[in-house]
């Protein structure tokens, strides 16, 4: 933090990211040098074969090259381990060491070519062990060079060319904060970021048709992601009159970082790059700098998540265990909880069945392939006249096995899958006397694009006062299914068969969000409908629609599931927390990552691994470094002070979105850590949307979202029989929001 600048551009790694790769290469090089030295010592003066003079020189040269590489790696590892994430001053010699290490690749490449030439030409008559050792050295050289090239490609930053930024900053001068040049620079930077993300999406989705709908989706998602991760239009102008109270902080920072060409500091949630060559210029020269509020590399984010995880655990341990839990105001605890759990467990089977054969085989790895093999190996499209889409036999057969329904119970089954068009099926549930609509969750790249189309789209509903808007991708998916159900007469056909049945809609993940919106669209025509939404996305409905849906939608959330807490305001909140905890770091990154890995794998008291906030008062950390109140700031609409951690939804850049309906939260009951074969018990409580306004860091944050995990938890609650959950039950109950 920020990314290292070498070879005239900024890269996707920081100067403190070279500890682990450098140590690994150092270990390999030392073993290689020892083996070469043993070979050279053993055969010294006794090279009895063709080209023995060349072989002697080759081994001596290889020893020298390896020794130089080992020395350079030692220096890189030692220097890279210095300083902290936000204090790269002690690592200012890293670029020079990187240049030196890169220079050593030239003789290594030459020596690898010479070794290969000797093996292919002059190695006849030599000891096979010697020839084998030279071949191993040549192969090892090429493998290391190959991995180095792959590493360079991996850390390449398309936005890392500083020349464009320098050229754009030059006309800003003293400069007018509202200047057209500054606006043009920021617009160019944002456009470049959007284009880069759009290119990445097209490369990732190269197997999809590049039609107009996909191009529009790529552009929309690129604007959203590029706006979140790239340059923000945050200007700062600091004059002596307003900076005097804070000059000592700036000078002290300069003294600690000891950087003379480029200086970085923290101001609120921005990272400031000073364009002056020394701190003294601040005393008499006003300046303008352009900031980048997410100047973090991937390892910085990983370190921040490790620190935030432990901080959340400490907050949870210090929380009063007898604290009162907020419950749904429309459903007091215990009044209808058991009945809703029974209905939810029943509907979850249909929501999971919508995933088709992949989830069925995953849940039944031994018997599943055998049961489905007959239907998968032959085409029965003519027989399944109600089914549309691909892999008809496999999918439909798995639905029959999962739900226990008969073929005659299905009204319509669609596996058609395009962007904003997701599979669903309609069946008669005679056990609950319901016409059931089940919507599939994310299972394809097209579904991912639908998920990522997270802008707000207006969804006016008659009788609902207040702003009505929802997640764009799921809103369009719900509209697609609505048209199929209503315009194609599918629901009319179902109710013609069973007119006394009620309508029930269900789904998981993407299917849950789409099902909730579909229920809202159909509510006017079917006042008695019910919707069971399992692990729905957090950024789904406006407050008005969320309140409206509480009469007929029940959302089920398991444990520390990430998706119900995933919304753009919550992501902005997480970013602010990461920036705050990383900016106050006083330990090297490699120690944070090592301790974080240990904590995730083996647990322990989080106090054993204190965060980088120790020895500092919390009230000091809540204040920005440069006293932002006195600075003249024109910031982006997403800019917020770090002191606003408790209100992520107040960001003006993105409208707040909430979970649908009443929320049934399932958590593990009992000790937070248990053995591999211990039993897991669950408890269920009514909750509300405010309990999901922060993202929880946990090893279970993805596992708790899986449909099989939700189904097993509901079965456990309704049958009152615990089940074994191993090994993911470890570390499962310690991850709560700060």
Image: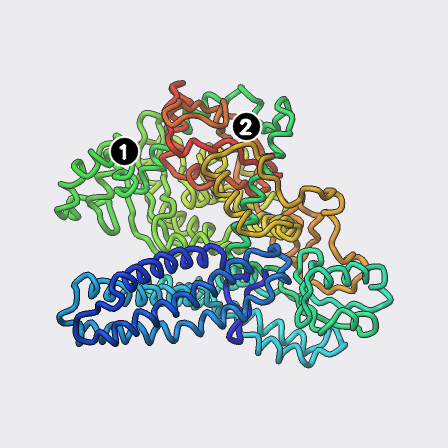
Picture quadrant where residue 235 is located:
bottom right
Q: Secondary structure at mark 1?
A: helix
Q: Residue at x 47, y 69 (%)?
A: 196
The spot of residue 134 in percent (x, y) is 25, 66
Residue tagged by mark 2?
Answer: 686
Picture quadrant where residue 677 is located:
top left
Q: Residues within 10 Å of mark 2 (few under 14, many from 20)?
A: many
Work out how far the residue at label 2 is from the one at label 1, CA to CA, in angstroms.
28 Å
The spot of residue 562 in percent (x, y) is 49, 42
The spot of residue 190 in percent (x, y) is 57, 69
Q: Is residue 447 above or below residue 633?
A: above
Say whether residue 435 is left or right of residue 164: left
Q: Secondary structure at mark 2?
A: strand
Q: Residue at x 37, y 28 (%)?
A: 346
Q: Relative to the observer, which residue lies in front, 370 or 390?
A: 370
**Colour mode?**
rainbow
Say whether residue 596 is left or right of residue 289: left
Q: Earlier in the sequence, mark 2 or mark 1?
A: 1
Residue tagged by mark 1?
Answer: 402
Q: Relative to the observer, which residue lies in front, 453 or 174?
A: 174
Q: Residues within 10 Å of mark 1 (few under 14, many from 20)?
A: some
Quadrant into which the N terminus falls: bottom right
């Amino acid at each position: 933090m920020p990314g290292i600048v070498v070879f005239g551009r900024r890269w996707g790694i920081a100067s403190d990211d070279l500890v682990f790769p450098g140590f690994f290469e150092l270990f390999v090089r030392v073993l290689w040098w020892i083996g070469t030295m043993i070979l050279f010592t053993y055969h010294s003066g006794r090279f009895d074969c063709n080209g023995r003079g060349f072989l002697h020189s080759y081994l001596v040269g290889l020893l020298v090259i390896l020794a130089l590489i080992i020395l350079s790696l030692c220096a890189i590892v030692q220097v890279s381990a210095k300083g902290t994430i936000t204090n790269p001053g002690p690592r200012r010699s890293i670029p020079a060491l990187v240049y030196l290490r890169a220079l050593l690749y030239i003789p290594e490449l030459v020596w690898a070519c010479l070794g290969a030439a000797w093996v292919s030409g002059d190695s006849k008559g030599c000891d096979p062990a010697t020839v084998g050792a030279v071949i191993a050295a040549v192969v090892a050289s090429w493998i290391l060079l190959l991995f180095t090239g792959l590493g360079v490609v991996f850390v390449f930053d398309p936005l890392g060319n500083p020349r464009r930024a320098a050229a754009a900053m030059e006309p800003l001068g003293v400069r007018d904060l509202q200047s057209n040049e500054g606006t043009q620079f920021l617009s160019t930077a944002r456009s470049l970021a959007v284009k880069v993300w759009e290119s990445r999406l097209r490369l990732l989705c190269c197997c999809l048709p590049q039609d107009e709908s996909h191009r529009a989706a790529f552009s929309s998602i690129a604007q959203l992601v590029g706006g979140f991760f790239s340059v923000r239009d945050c200007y700062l102008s600091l004059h002596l009159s307003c900076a005097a109270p804070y000059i000592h902080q700036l000078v002290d920072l300069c003294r600690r970082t000891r950087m003379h060409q480029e200086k970085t500091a923290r101001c609120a949630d921005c990272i400031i790059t000073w364009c002056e060559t020394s701190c003294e210029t601040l005393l008499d020269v006003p300046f303008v700098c352009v900031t980048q509020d997410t100047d973090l590399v991937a390892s910085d984010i990983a370190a921040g998540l490790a620190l935030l995880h432990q901080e959340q655990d400490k907050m949870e341990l210090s929380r009063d265990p007898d604290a009162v839990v907020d419950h749904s105001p429309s459903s007091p605890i215990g009044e209808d909880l058991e009945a809703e759990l029974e209905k939810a467990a029943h509907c979850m089977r249909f929501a999971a069945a919508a995933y088709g054969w992949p989830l069925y085989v995953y849940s039944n790895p031994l018997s599943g392939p055998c049961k489905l093999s007959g239907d998968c190996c032959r085409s029965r499209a003519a027989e399944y006249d109600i089914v549309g889409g691909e892999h008809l036999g496999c999918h439909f057969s798995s639905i029959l096995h999962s739900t226990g329904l008969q073929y005659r119970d299905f009204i319509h089954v669609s596996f058609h899958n395009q962007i904003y068009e997701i599979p669903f099926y309609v069946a008669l549930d005679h056990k609950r006397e319901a016409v059931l609509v089940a919507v599939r969750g994310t299972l394809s790249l097209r579904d991912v694009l639908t998920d990522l189309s997270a802008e707000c789209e207006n969804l006016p509903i008659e009788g609902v006062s207040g702003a009505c808007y929802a997640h764009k991708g799921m809103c369009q998916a719900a509209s697609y299914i609505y048209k199929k159900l209503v315009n194609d007469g599918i629901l009319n056909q179902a109710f013609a068969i069973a007119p006394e049945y009620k309508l029930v809609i269900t789904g998981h993940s993407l299917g849950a969000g789409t099902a909730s919106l579909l229920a809202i669209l159909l509510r006017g025509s079917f006042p008695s409908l019910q919707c069971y939404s399992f692990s729905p996305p957090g950024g789904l409905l406006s407050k008005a629609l969320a309140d409206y849906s509480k009469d007929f939608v029940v959302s089920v959330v398991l444990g520390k599931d990430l998706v119900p807490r995933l919304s753009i305001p919550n992501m902005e909140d997480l970013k602010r927390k990461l920036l705050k905890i990383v900016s106050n770091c006083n330990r090297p990154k490699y120690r944070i990552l090592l301790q974080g890995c240990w904590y995730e794998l083996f647990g322990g008291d989080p106090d054993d691994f204190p965060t980088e906030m120790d020895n500092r008062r919390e009230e000091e950390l809540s204040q920005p470094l440069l006293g932002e109140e006195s600075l003249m700031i024109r910031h982006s609409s997403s800019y917020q002070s770090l002191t606003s951690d408790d209100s992520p939804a107040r960001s003006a850049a993105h409208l707040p979105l909430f979970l649908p309906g009443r929320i049934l939260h399932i958590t593990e009951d009992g000790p937070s850590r248990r053995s591999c074969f211990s039993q897991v018990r669950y408890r269920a409580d009514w909750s509300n949307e405010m309990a999901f306004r922060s993202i929880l860091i946990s090893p279970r944050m993805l596992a708790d979202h899986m449909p099989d995990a939700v189904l097993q938890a509901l079965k456990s609650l309704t049958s009152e029989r615990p089940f074994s959950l191993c090994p993911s039950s470890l570390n499962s109950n310690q991850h709560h929001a700060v």
